[in-house]
Each structure stands twice: as structure tokens, then as C-alpha cells.
Amino acid sequence: MEHIVFLTGRLALPNLERVLTGMEPAPFTWEVREIGLQVAGLMTADMIRRRIATAPSADRILVPGRCRGDLAALSAHYGVPVERGPEELKDIPRHFNRAAQANRLDDYDIEIFAEIVDAPRLDVPEIVARAEILAADGADVIDLGCLPATPFPHLEDAVAALKAAGFRISVDSQDVDELLRGGRAGADYLLSLTLDSLWIANEVAATPVLIPREPSDEASLYAAVEAMQRRGRPFLADAILDPIPFGLLGSLCRYQRLRERFADIAIMMGVGNVTELTEADTSGINAVLFGIAAELRAGAVLTTQVSRHARRAVREADVARRVMYQARETSSLPKGMTDALMTVHGKYPFPDSPDEIAETARSVRDPSFRVQISQRGLHIYNRDGHHVDTDPFALYPRLGVEADGGHAFYLGVELARAEIAWSLGKRYSQDQPLDWGCATDRPVDDRLQQCAPGPTRRKPSSGASTRPECVTEQP
């Protein structure tokens, strides 16, 4: 059986042992080693190397998730794999349950068509710049949305520039001439052809997306599909998704009937009528719609991000298609794969109970403040006391930082984050930004970079910043 050595600090030691004991029977044997520092999250690779002279007798060494430094070099030094565990020790059981499923969201089978809905109003450089953003978020095909009664004289130039930049392109128009122009310019797809305009597919090489004459006219869509099948040409078929409450359920049934009639054709589902026209967080809407698309085995989804509340729709779509593919292919529920679509609430927001936090607070012997949250509220403590409240303003008079502006500012930021996390039920970690999933841009956390050492409370000096960087201690 594998033997794992867990490295930690003094304050975390009791909780870590409690968590590991609670895992019994664990799929490994273990021991905990405290390396002579107080805060486990401040551990670095250099510090470990200085304080542990010889390699522990272990098959693997697990260090705290926030440990900074080059663990590959540390592994080479000891001759034993050194790995980061989860950032919160309470997540260790889930960490080991998921270890065998790492990197499982690499695969998907739904392509994302991301529409630039106002392409005629943008010049070519603006269209290319928009396409680069959409592709970075996960779009596979850039859809040029044409506008009714709006000239698009630079359509051919836009298609050429996008193709030169390596993008696949679709042209989306109700105007026959624009579809022909787009196809002749080299567009890969044309949205959308009905039974009446199917002749366009004979004029250009672009793959057509077929739609019914009217959303309820399923017979015309079936006839268009059968015509393309006779020609032996590739195509996609879209039954048209209607908005809430104007036929969404009926349109979903249309998609189901389309799949039942044509078991092997490529289906496209346009989701913008639901994500754009429903004022609700789109991450959850996309999760559901891509789950339906996965059940349909749809080949493509057309999405937009026009409304401000839908500005992350492409990124959400990219996450959702991967999650739902994995769920379908493994016959499992779409749970425990990623938190990226849980933008507002956390699944495990309060890893520590009030009693556990109080126990840790009693062990603190320095003046630096620690901030945590539990179901009871916000906890802030140092060697001088442990205070709990749901209102940061109620905590401020108890902290004694009135004469230390930099420290007061720092604690204000941290308590504000803690209050938001407590109110919504999100995970909070001191000195870390709140995790909003794929709803926001978040810089990659470079674990080779180390936080500058120093206490949260600093004495101002001439010309020196009083901004506390983090809760740290000298190595």
C-alpha cells in the first residue's frame, strides 16, 4: 500500500490529523510531519529543503496546495514525488477520490459557433479582434451575423481576413445575396437555408445549416434534410430553439423528433434565444442546454454574448460541453468535475466549523490577524482575541487598528471578501481572490512565485508602503 507523508505547519497539524483519521480506511498509509513553521500555507520548496535534510521514507510527499516553489526540483532532490494537495485540508478526501479522474475534461464533440451579431457595423480589424477573443474563450467557428437592411460591403474582406488568421467562418443572413457572397468568399458554413433557398448549396462549397420555413413547419425541415442526403453533401439541421415562455418546451420536442427521424445527421442548436432573452445567470442555463444538446448528440451549438448578463456565454459553453460530454460518456451525473459553472455559490463553502476555528485561534501567539468564515459568520483573530460577527463594521472597533491606515485598509478588503463569501455561501481563503468560476478572468496562479514575507500589521516607516501583502512569517 502506498505510504504518503503530509507536510504541514503547527496550526494546521491537529485538523490535518483529524481529517486523515476520518478518512479511514484510507487507500494509503500516512504520517504527518510538522516542519517548524506556524502557517502551513506559507510553506515553500526552499523552506522544505532546508528543514528536511533527508528524504522521508515515503512513496509520495504531499505539501499544502498553496506551497510556492519548484516541486519538480524538490522531487529530484529527494528521489520521491513531491506534489501539492488541495488548498484546503478539508478537501483532502475529495482530492483522493478525484485523483484518478484528472484531466478528464479534455474531450468534447459539440462545436461552438460564436456569432458576431453586429459584424456589418465593425471594420475588418475590429471583426478579427472580436474573433480572437471569442476563439480564446472556446469558439470553434466565428459566425458573421448580417443585419437586416444594413449594407455589408466589406463581407468578402472580413471573410478573407478571418480565413487568413486561421479561423473557420460561417455567414449568417436572411439575405440570399449575402449568403452567396459569403460562400463565394470562402465561408465554411452558411446560416441558414430553407427548402426554398436550398439551391444556394449548389452554387458554393460552404456547408449549409438547414432550418424550417417557420419554426413549426417541421415537414419543410425534414424535406430539406432528405434533399441534402440525396445529394450526399454535408449539412447541419437546426429545429430552432424558441424563447421562454413562447414555445421553449415545444421546440425542445421538435429537436427530439428531428433526432428520432434522422438518427445520424449533424444537428445544430442555437441557444441565444434562451441565454440572451432570460435575465438569469447564464452559467446555469448553459449547463442545462448543453446537457440537452449532449443527449441529442448535437454536433454544434450557436451562441451569442450580446446582453451584458450573457457576456461570458462562450466560455460557459466551452466548459458545459466538456462536462456534459464526460457525463454522457461515463454514464455519470454532471457532478464533481469542475466548479467553473458554479459562479455564485460554492459546493463546500464552510470547511471549518466555529469550534475548529476557535481551537486554531487559541493556538495563535502572534499579532497578525487571521480571517475565516463559518456558518456562524466572519471570524477574525490573533493572539489578543477572537471575534465573530456577520457585519464587518461591528468587528472594526474591536481590532485596534484606528491608528494604522494601511492595516485597516487591508483588513477592510479581507473582511469585505469574507462577508460576500459568507452571504452567498462561497469558499473564502485569506489573501486570495474569491473564485467566480468562468464568470471572470482570473490570472494563472504561478506557484513558482513566492509571497513577500512580513506580518499583516506593519509599523509605518518613512517612504515605505504600509500595505500588508499576506499573512506570512519569516522562513
Image (cartoon, rainbow, N blue to C red):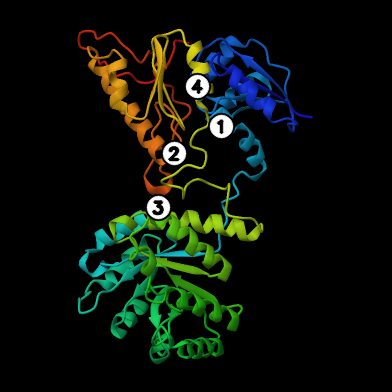
User: Rounded to the nearest whole Å, what is the CA distance between mark 1 and mark 2?
Assistant: 16 Å
Residue identifier under label 4: 357
The label nearer to you, 2 versus 3, is 2
Which residue matches tag 3? Answer: 136
Residues under labels 3 and 1: Cα distance? 27 Å
* Residue depicted at 44% across the width and 22% down the height: 450
For residue 126, side relative to residue 366 (left or right) = left
Residue under numbered circle 2? 426
Residue underneath mark 1: 86
Q: Verify CB contact (< 8 Å) between mark 3 and mark 4.
A: no
Q: Nearer the viewer, mark 3 or mark 4?
A: 4
Residue at x 79%, y 29% (from the top left corner): 1
C-alpha gap between disc 2 and disc 3: 27 Å
Q: Earlier in the sequence, mark 3 or mark 4?
A: 3
Q: Residues within 10 Å of mark 3 (few under 14, many from 20)?
A: few
Are the residues tagged 1 and 2 within 8 Å (C-beta)?
no
